[in-house]
Image (tube, grey):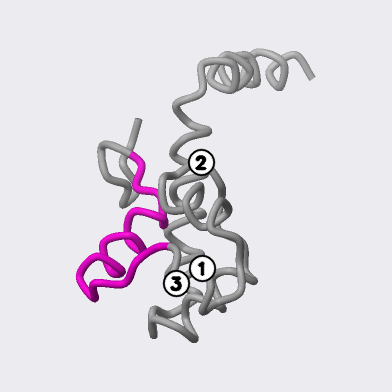
């Protein structure tokens, strides 16, 4: 697979946000309270179990001064790279040229 600017392992935007919070010594509970989201939702996002949404990206931009569009680009790359590694999707993609050639 061509890398197309992707790292070997997908990087979830939660990792970037989590690193930033740790660098600034901000606890997850306090941050969740400050941006008015549940601790569970924040923890799941920071641990890559929940996707970043445009709304949460804007909240993080306001709180941490991390550009929301950059965070969403990381999410898009993560989502695409994860999908490319999915064996079911790869199987579907492998059949597309044969179907198209029959038309």
Q: Which residue is mark 3?
A: 31
User: Which quadrant would the C terminus be assigned to in this image?
Assistant: top right
What's drawn in magenta, residue-wise?
Answer: 10-28
First of labels 3, 2 by sequence position: 3
Give residue 20's position: percent from left, percent from top: 28, 69
- Secondary structure under tag 2 reads loop
Identify the residue at image location x=36%, y=41%. 10
Marks 3/2: CA–CA distance:
18 Å
Marks 1/3: CA–CA distance:
4 Å
- Secondary structure under tag 1 reads helix
Q: Residues within 10 Å of mark 2 (few under 14, many from 20)?
A: few
First of labels 2, 1 by sequence position: 1
Q: Which residue is mark 1?
A: 32
Q: Which residue is mark 2?
A: 49
Q: Quadrant of residue 71?
A: bottom left
Give residue 79's position: percent from left, percent from top: 52, 44
Give residue 38's position: percent from left, percent from top: 60, 61
Can residue 101 be found in the magenta stretch? no
- Secondary structure under tag 3 reads helix
């Amino acid at each position: 697979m061509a890398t197309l600017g992707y790292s070997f392992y997908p990087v979830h935007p939660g990792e970037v946000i989590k690193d930033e919070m740790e660098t600034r010594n901000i606890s997850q509970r306090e941050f969740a309270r400050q941006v008015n989201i549940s601790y569970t939702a924040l923890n799941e996002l920071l641990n890559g179990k929940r996707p970043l949404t445009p709304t949460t990206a804007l909240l993080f931009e306001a709180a941490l001064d991390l550009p929301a569009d950059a965070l969403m680009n990381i999410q898009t790359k993560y989502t695409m790279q994860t999908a490319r590694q999915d064996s079911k999707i790869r199987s579907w993609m492998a059949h597309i040229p044969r179907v198209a050639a029959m038309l």
